[in-house]
Amino acid sequence: MPEPGPLRLGVNIDHVATIRNARGGEHPDPARAAALVRAAGGEGITFHLREDRRHIRDDDLVRIREAAGGLPLNFEMAATDEMISIAERFAPDAACLVPERREERTTEGGLDAAGGHDRLVGPVDRLREAGARVSLFIEPAHEQIAAAKSLGAPVVELHTGRYGELFLSGDDAACQSELQRLREAAAYASGLGLEAHAGHGLSFDNVAPVAAIREVVELNIGHFLIGEAVFTGLEAAIARMRELMDEARA
Ligand code: PXP
């Protein structure tokens, strides 16, 4: 079997803005975090402009771009006309469509690409025409991956939230079976010519088995890294995550 290729780390900086917004004002600034991600060797900046603007705000976007100094920007968004229009103007390198419900605390579950084809086809086309590499944040299920392919999205981001929860639950058998589902999904996506990414709920403790999946080429990690940064600083947290990913990959 060939050696697995490189694995990129995209850092989701939303929760720097969550802390800022808890008080209002400008501190801590997610744009400053974007500059630190670059300094620490992160390979991409991910941010989610939510409908309710609970963390990233519209006025953050340009400052994040300036601070990122050329690192690829991955714009997560719901497939609404408002968000697609903002993305068309902003022209990010990558755009990731996610499901969004106002009452959820974070993105719970993947996008229903299989059941939502007619609703998603327009947004995927518009984002592609805006020059973004489109990914769909989906559950690691064959029908969702096949639907992403038929929608013309070149990338799928496999939702690792369930794996993360099972990891914490102590139910090892269920956790291993979810991991196997992720492995099979990544292989299936790759076989269809799609690029496989993964993310949600990843931490120092649970990242290794996901990083070891050879078809996965990018991880997007946010909440844990920003939380860890409170104790060690963002650069150290990213450097440690990078180390764990590289070890798992080797
Ligand atoms: N990928 C996607 C598509 C997401 O929506 C999120 C959460 O915003 C993440 C990755 C990162 O998840 P976490 O913050 O749990 O690391």
Image (tube, rainbow, N blue to C red):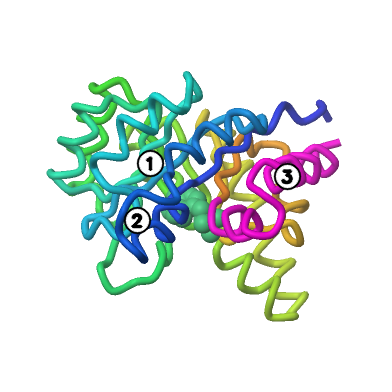
**If the image is split into quadrants, where does the C terminus sit?**
top right
Q: CA distance from mark 3 to mark 2?
A: 23 Å
- Given residues 94 and 212, the one toward you in this image is 94
Q: Main secondary structure of the magenta part?
A: helix
Residues at marks 1 and 3, CA–CA distance in whole angstroms: 27 Å
Question: What number is the disc on residue 193?
Answer: none
What range is drawn magenta here?
Answer: 222-250
Q: Residue at x 66, y 36 (%)?
A: 215
Say above or below: 73 vs 233: above
Residue that appears at 34% across and 27% down: 92
Q: Which SS class for mark 2?
A: loop
Helix, strand or loop status at disc 1: strand
Can residue 141 be seen in the rendering of this structure?
A: no
Kind of residue sitting beneath label 1? Cys
Q: Is residue 71 left or right of residue 97?
A: right
Which residue shows up at 77% across the image and 51% down it? 208
